[in-house]
Amino acid sequence: MNYQFNKFSLDVNKQELTFNRIVIPLSKQLFDLLFLFVQNPNKVFSKDDIIAKVWSGKYVTENSIDKSISKLRKLFSEHNQDDFIKTSYGKGFIFVSDVSLLDESPTGPGSNPKVSRFKAYVIGAMLLFIVLIVAVVNKRSTENKPNSLLLIISSADASGNEGWLNTSAAVYLGQVFGMSDNVYLKNIDQRPKYQNREQYISTQWRISPNLQVVTSKTIQNDHSYTVELSVTNKSQLKQSRSFTNQNLALAMRAASKWLSSVFVESNPLGAIDSQIPNDSYLIELYMHGLASYAQGEFDSAENYYQLCLQKKPDFLLAKLELARVKSALGKQQQGLALLDTVLKTDTYPQLKIEAQSIKGLIYNILGKDEVNRDLYKSVLSEYANKDYPQLKKIKLNLSFTYTKLTEFKKALGLLNELESSIDERLNPELLASTYQKQASILQKMGYIEEAQKSAQKSLSLYSKLGDLLGEAKIHTTLARIATHQSKYMESIHHLEQSLAICKTLDYKLGIGATLNELIYVLMVQGYFEKASLLNQEMQKIAIEIGYNAMLQISKQFAVDLSRVQKQWVKSEMGLKAHLRFAELAENKSALLTNKLLSLDLILDQNKVEGVIDLISQVQAHIDETGEVRLQPRLNKQLARLYLLQGQQETAVTLLLTTKELAKNTQDGEVIIEVNNLLAEQYLDLDNPQKALMVLEDSFEFDPFSYPLMLLKSKANFALGKRLLALDLANECKLLSNEWWSIDDERYLSTLVSSAE
């Protein structure tokens, strides 16, 4: 089908827009949006309509829709056309152009089949001729010129030793080419540590067939330097050149310019000239700094970069790297000062974006999340009309910052924009990370099906990449989703896979993150002693790697474990320690967790003082952030308060509505907990049959035996079914692990006595 409006034509089969036969590139979202409009001219579409039809109901921000509309309007204006999309205030958008659907088939009345066939032959011959001409021209223009996706690596000698000069020269080449508009760079250092070069390159070629591998070898002779370059594609076609000069800087510059001429892109030679000074000794100092930093010798790297800047104060790459080193040494303010100097100079935007990225990392270390958010937003705003690869990493980092600030809707909207802009062939690693982060946020917001889809996409990509650590990370996310649904065995399955990978690779951070999830699952099932031992292991790892967030979580588990074992004094002490730690770190997420822990601890002791105030604070957080997953959990706590206050009818009504709300977020854990509370109330009201009915609702999920089976036992006992009640209680005792209490044992003794 071909839709015509004004001088535009939208070809549905090709998913292509043309203006006066000139093709206009469109992203998938823009094509789908325009297709919706041309199919329905003069019809008003609300933003909800557009989300449902263009984004298939996926969560996006209103800002995303406004941006897409703005891009279409800009496209029309660039071709001196009227704005066909009008805003109907309070209602939505309307496409106001006349649209005609073209029928290009020659079967209408009066058509001549022979003439039509002859025309078809002529047109076909002309098209074939044009295609051949274009192919010849393209072949001539792109002969020996590969596509602009590069992987720059350094070569190793027979012993596997690359040498500091060889390694740092390859890094330097990557930095220079990183300032190009049209070259997308990868680096061998991005490969998983357990993959060798051949495995990594083979995997990358499988995903990115246009990848060109640039191998550099830089050696120092008696009185000169030689830079050897080779460019190899997937078909193993290779181009090679060698550049020798007494001046290392001039050899590097000549090699860089040749590499620039090989690739079809607009890398300005000025970038090479400005970032590779003529001074050979200066370049040696800089490369020594790169090599020292790569080996973790930060003091040495700092010294080399400072010497560079003494010789050439405007050597911006050295200033940038010195800021990075200052941050690694804990000299954050000095690093920020250097970066501010870089940002005030008139240099290439890619270098400025990198400077902003390093600033963001420093602000993250300092815990200045609001400042970090505003920094990233300003960068994206400044380069809104550009498509530099570095900006995509900025977007991902901003989504992490939004998440830390509990601005989940903004984070998710940004990730959805990022997903649609990433080409899997260019950056599968970034796309996998984007899917993983989407899954995590969707789970927090209660969109479980969408979370599972994003998680599976991420797992598939990590598997393609052969990235085991990526797989471990997404297995942890899938475990969290399964736990949310009360599918504990499925959760443990994912966690065991994650833990096996992390321990094999001795990845301490991953081990700790997996233990975090496993401790909770074990605790819920009553394995308190085992959970406590694992928590001590996690705490040890957190201290060893200096990860305060993990240490904070271990303190949270210490509170929970003492609480469920009714060690109230120990819980109170742990809660205060947890709060102090959260306040010192200004960790909003941990401060919220402290409120939730406080609610559990107060209500578990059948107290009511301070509960309303805590509930109000958590409710304000939900209203502000949209973290609706917490709403059923908070409602359950409010119902518990009503029960303690003797408002049983109000509590039961709230529990029933809470259960429906939890179904919307597929929160199996809350549904089971609510059913248990309801069953207890129905037993108090002498209605055991209703108690049994509500308990049956829990089996839609995967409920843990305790206290559900114990409540079933009590309901059957109330109905006079003593032997069945005894069977259920005995089974519950066998499966409940350390949840089984003295009161439960007394109840079991009563059943035994009655059975006799």
Image (spheres, rainbow, N blue to C red):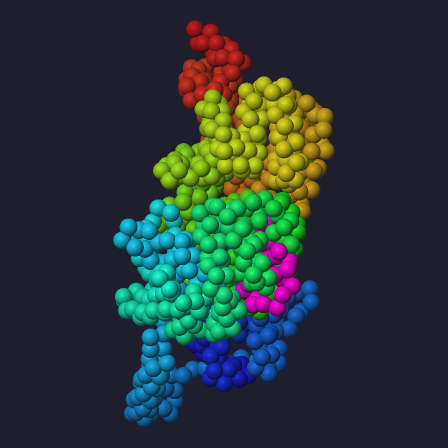
Please determine whether, in this image, residue 417 is positioned above or below residue 503.
below
> Residue at the spot x=61%, y=47% of the render?
332
Query: Which is nearer the eye, 377 or 260?
Result: 260
Query: Which is nearer the eye, 624 or 91?
Result: 624
Main secondary structure type of the part rendered in magenta: helix
Location of residue 237 in the rendering, given as x and y in whole percent from the top left corner? 28, 69
> Residue at the spot x=66%, y=31% of the render?
580
Location of residue 480 in the rendering, given as x and y in whole percent from the top left corner? 48, 39
Answer yes or no: is residue 80 visible. Answer: yes
Query: Which is nearer the eye, 581 or 714?
Result: 581
Location of residue 382 in the rendering, given as x and y in whole percent from the top left corner? 62, 65
Res 312 quadrant in image: bottom right
Q: Quadrant of the C terminus?
A: top left
Farthest front residue?
223
Say left or right for 580 vs 687. right
Res 395 quadrant in image: bottom right
Answer yes or no: is residue 399 visible. Answer: no
Residue 524 located within the stretch drawn in magenta: no
Location of residue 485 in the rendering, given as x and y in whole percent from the top left corner? 48, 38
Residue 353 located within the stretch drawn in magenta: yes
First to last magenta residue range = 338-364
> Residue at the spot x=48%, y=50% of the render?
293
Q: Quadrant of the N terminus?
A: bottom left
> Residue at the spot x=61%, y=46% of the render?
331
